[in-house]
Amino acid sequence: MRTDNRHGFALPAAIGALVIIGILVTSGFFMARQELRIGVASHNANLAVNLAQVGANEVMANWNGYQLGLITPWDSAIINGAGPGGNWRVSVVNANNYVYRITSTGQVTEGGALWAGSRRTIGIVARMLYANINPPGALTTRGNVQVKGTSAITGTNTTPPTWGPYCTTLPTNNMAGVVTNTGGTVTTQGAGTVTGNPPTVQDPTIVSSTFTNFGNLTWAELVALAQIEGKVITGINQVNNTAPVVTGGVCDESVLLNWGEPTIPTSPCGAYFPLIYHGGNVTIQSNGYGQGILLVEGDLMVRGGYRFFGIIITQGAFATGAGGATITGAVLAGNDLLLDQTATGGGQIIYSRCAVTRSVLNNANLSRARPLRERSWVDMTAVVN
């Protein structure tokens, strides 16, 4: 019998098939893993952008007057926070007190050491939207004004001591000393003075609504906002010794007579400019001091060395008395009974654009940061990271 020496091919074929299958399976796992990585990376990149946007929105929606009101032009402040799945870090740069550059970075923390760490950065240019309270002079009123003794009303723009770094980008033009309605007179006696550019103006547009309508806000709305802030004074017609109160290193807004700290801008109450309301006639005296916007439903007398920085609006008459009180900012006195406005006893009203502007911009109820209408948003990831 003849026997052929035949070489088998089944085993090599089986081994080859197993190799091919192994390659296919390995390739499949590799591709699946790559797809998973791509999916997770895409998810985390989107999550990081969302975190960055959450941080920017949080800062703009809850504009922090204490922290952000202390930023000098072209300096910055950092705010940190957390959102779903990660953290955010926001840098706020003050361009000119009205425009801010917001840079927000979101970082993913979920997923453990393997997946966490994705970061994205966005940039937003925001501008301040604020109440239009813009007094045309140091004292704006209706009726007659008398300046007696050594009292002075000046429209020369003045920056309060220690406020220089916060006022560098604001207008420096001088204003009128006294602006009154047609028929209103301004007289001086003794060493009393009225100065400005010009010293006095008779403006026919000064009417009752000048003291009740402020852009999109009315007097009633300002009063309602003061009630929200808890700065409504009732039951007393004489206020003494307003002064800043700091508790645990934080400005204590709950204290009724805490009206901020104008003498040390960098202190915890240095950027606190409250909205304050009194529902009748009131006298403010002593060597106390404060800042912000003071609303008085009736007549206001300020005396005894008292110092106030910001805006005073009365629906009645305004007067300074003995002791040399000083108002730095501006006064709008509605003078609803057309009484004579009187400055005596060495009292001074000194126009300050910076005091007027900061009292509005640093009040959270009167100002908001909002993105520019066009081209305000940019992805800065490649630039920053």
Image (tube, helix red, strand yellow):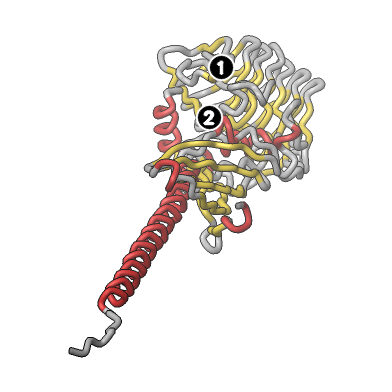
Left or right: 282 as drawn, with respect to 306? left
Residue linked to disc 1: 249
What is the quadrant of the N terminus in the image?
bottom left
Q: Residue at x 62, y 47 (%)?
A: 98
Q: Residue extending furthest bottom?
A: 2
Closest to the observer: 164 or 353?
Answer: 164
Which numbered disc, 2 or 1, marks the residue that appears first in the sequence? 1
Vertical order, 141 against 345 (above or below): below
Vertical order, 110 against 335 (above or below): below
Q: Amino acid at mark 1?
A: Gly
Q: Position of residue 141 (x, y in %)?
A: 60, 36
Q: Is residue 209 visible?
A: no
Q: Position of residue 91 (x, y in %)?
A: 59, 42
Dot 2 alpha-carbon crowd within 10 angstroms: few under 14, some 14 to 19, many 20 or more: many
Could you say which disc has been placed on residue 147 in the image?
none
State the separation of the CA atoms marked 2 and 1.
34 Å
Q: Residue at x 51, y 38 (%)?
A: 63
Left or right: 147 as drawn, with respect to 224? right
Q: Position of residue 198 (x, y in %)?
A: 77, 43
Closest to the observer: 32 or 201?
Answer: 32
Q: Is residue 26 visible?
A: yes
The quadrant holding residue 171 is top right
Could you say which disc has been placed on residue 314 in the image?
2
Dot 1 alpha-carbon crowd within 10 angstroms: few under 14, some 14 to 19, many 20 or more: few
Q: Nearer the viewer, mark 2 or mark 1?
A: 1
Q: Amino acid at mark 2?
A: Thr
Label pair 2/1, CB-CB below 8 angstroms: no
Which structural element holds mark 1?
Answer: loop
Q: Position of residue 240 (x, y in %)?
A: 56, 10
